[in-house]
Image (spheres, grey):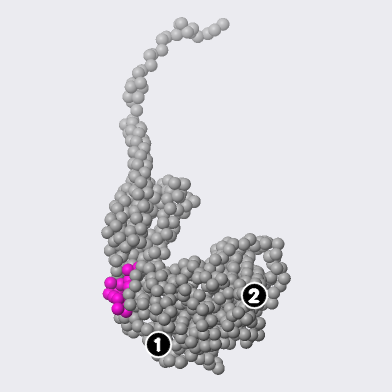
Amino acid sequence: MATGLSHHDAPPRPAAPPFEARHRHRSPRGRGLILALIVLAGLVLLAIAWIGLRGFLAQQELNAAVPDVRAVRAAVAESDTAGAASAATELQKHAHAAVSLTSDPVWQLAEGIPWVGGNLSAVSTISRATDAVASDVIKPLVSIAGSVDPRTLHLTGGTLDLAPIVAAQPVMAKAQTAFDSARSDIGSIDRSSVISPIGSAVTKMRSLMAEVAPDLQAVDNTVRLLPGMLGADGPRSYLIVAQNPAELRATGGLIGSVVLVNADKGAVALSTEVAGTSIGPWPTPVFDVPTATSGLYGPLVGRYLQDVNFTPDFPLAARTASAMWVRTHGGVVDGVITVDPVVLSAMLKATGPVTLPSGDVLTSANAVPLLLSGIYARYPDAPQKQDAFFSKAASAVFDRVVGGVDGAALVKALAASGTSNRIQIWSSHASEQSILETTTLAGALPVSTPETAALGVYFNDATGSKMDYYLRTSVAAGAAVCRADGKVTTMLEVTLTNGAPANAATALPAYVTGAGSYGVPPGDIKTRIAFYGPEQGLLAGVKSKGVDVPSIAGTDNGRPVAVVEVQLAPGQSKTIDVQFLGTAQWAPGYTVDVTPTLKGDGTTPDVGARPSVARIAVPCSSVVK
């Protein structure tokens, strides 16, 4: 039996109060908290919208800045100062806007938020770097472009006006510093910590700065070097040594003639020209040649001018040559510059044809075959006349250049010659040499990094003649990690071919074939190849068709070296493979420095092309384990 009141008997429940009544008695503190949360949520949403909108607009501004940078470069390349200034102004406007959009207090506060903040910080860094490049690099450089552009510099009456270049030095120094700082800021961004679109923007900015850097560096080097080297602070004297690639040396060719050039307050004049054979030889070295160098290349490096460049270390060769000049002629040598007929051929494109005292008209098309082949047929038994002809040719081109030529065409020719290692410059002044060492003109031994093994292949004639006019060279290289310890194996493969006619022994002058004077049959070509491995590396093997080949092994400034002799009759070829083991590299990157040679068929090499190096696969099965 149920007890208590039934549903029907129970007293009625009070009606539920309305919603307002239920909450009427909450504390003011509770109501304030809810209101604050609502306001905060609104502010967060507003901040997200604000940052998103400004980030989008900043991206638009940065995207618009990229073509402005390229427009500035294009205008400068065309010597269009007005166009460059206009493009620079547009670039600056877009860059300023990007910085303004990414530097307000809300954006800066949001940069402290985990994950999101890193992306925002990357965008603001890109914006500031772009603004710095626009305002502190491009804008001031455009204002001095007309006075420091290497293509607009030219000698008038043998003199270059140095005043505008000197005036531009502080501007250039500040611009280079600002650029390096901006590039460092972009380089410090961790791409792995940002979202893909921002990572792509970082990559694009890095690529753009890498694209601009060489142009900026070239102008900076010009501004820093030219005044001093051309006598702004006192007279200078330079040796211009003419290398003959028909008789190879590691830096390009035997030194056939030497010209002394003086410079003072921008005025340049040829002083003395002599044949290389008129300098030395000496019974003992005139310069302190390192024992390792003598061990690899013999004792003649320090005794014969023609042999100072058996070593590929051009600064060492240049110091030795300058010591020999001073020993013979006295005075002071402030630097050494190399050229060869391929360089003269390129310069003749700027100067136009030059008439020589002999009546010959020297042109870009005939300079190489005339100076490196035709002259030996004309004077087969008169080396003094050959040297004199070459010297007169170099002097005639020099006279045309100092007389005033198209600066843009000349700089193009000289830049191409430097790119292909056919012009090298050494300065006896430490401050200038330190700048040259950062360029392709220094001719120093290649320098390795942890990511890249710097290799070298250098050729020296051992025939004792001018047969290298017919020598064809082919260089290939590769790198791989084949060992359990992770050390990198690099391989160099060199193929030499004697392209001389089959009847070279009788068809060519004895002066060209050597007539067997050094034990090489007429018509044959004998070459010493110096293979250089990476610094701190090890020589692992020297082979031809899988068979060990005799070699001279040594080191040069911490680099393992193998010197191999190859002798070829007309039509013969031979391939040498050399393997090195890197001990300081952790990645299979590599570079290869190669002696600039001729094509071996009588045609003129492309002066703007670096010696070609093909890529090969390293067969790990053959690697020393």
The residue under label 1 is: 272
Q: Are marks 2 and 1 in contact (CB under 8 Å)?
A: no
The residue positioned 43% from the left and 46% from the top of the image is 116
The residue positioned 63% from the left and 69% from the top of the image is 495
Q: Residue furthest bottom?
A: 283
Q: Secondary structure at mark 1?
A: strand
Q: Is residue 108 visible?
A: no
Q: Which mark is residue 502?
A: 2
Q: Magenta residues, as a range? A: 151-166
Dot 1, how many residues are within 10 Å of its Cα: few (below 14), some (14-19), or many (20+)? few
Image quadrant containing the N terminus: top right
Above-or-below relation of 187 to 238: above
Toward which corner of the image does residue 416 lie, by quadrant? bottom left
Above-or-below relation of 591 to 108: below
Q: Is residue 180 magenta?
A: no
Q: Position of residue 102 (x, y in %)?
A: 34, 49
Toward which corner of the image does residue 474 lie, by quadrant? bottom right
